[in-house]
Amino acid sequence: MKVYFNNSCNICRAEIDLYKKQNVEDIEWIDITNNKSAEIETQKNDKTLLRRLHIKDGEKIISGAEAFLLVWKKIPKYKFLYTFFKVPIIFTLFSYFYEIIAFFLYFKNKKQLSK
């Protein structure tokens, strides 16, 4: 599984660094900052990649709150988050909250776009 994240965003980097410390071999962490390969692999442009967390699992691309669920499911220390947030009503609330936060982080970080 490949996780595409924005390493130039302090908040994004801090959270991903917590996950990276768990050394899960099944996860490859990919910084999307000025990364044309990430755009090609995901078939997403830089704006779309910057807007949300993305995962490539096999040939499937998953983004947003659902992507976080998959990350948490793979990391034993954070599996409790997966268990809690996958409950339908909680997942719906989490998805809305995630989109609001992601929207503000996107505007905070969009200056890094090369276009």
Image: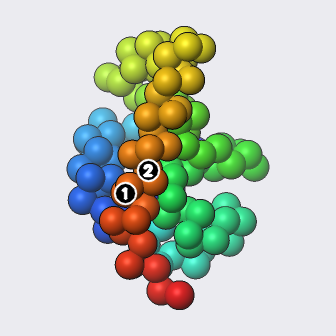
The numbered mark at residue 102 is: 2
Secondary structure found at label 2: helix
The numbered mark at residue 105 is: 1
Where is 16 relative to 41, above or below? Answer: above
Residue 22 visible to the viewer:
yes
Does the residue at mark 1 contact the one at mark 2 (Cβ under 8 Å)?
yes
Tell me the kind of residue under disc 2.
Ala
In-front residue for pair 25/41: 41
Where is 37 relative to 9, above or below? Answer: below
Colour convention: rainbow
How far across and how far down the image is residue 18, in percent? Answer: 26, 41
Residue 67, located in which quarter of the rendered image? Answer: top right
Circle 2 crowding by C-alpha within 10 Å: few under 14, some 14–19, many from 20 = some
Taking the spot 51% from the left edge, 76% from the top edge, the residue there is 35
Secondary structure found at label 1: helix
In-front residue for pair 7/107: 107
Circle 1 crowding by C-alpha within 10 Å: few under 14, some 14–19, many from 20 = some
Tell me the distance, in whole angstroms, between the alpha carbons under discs 1 and 2: 5 Å
**Position of residue 108 in the picture relative to residue 67 (left or right):** left
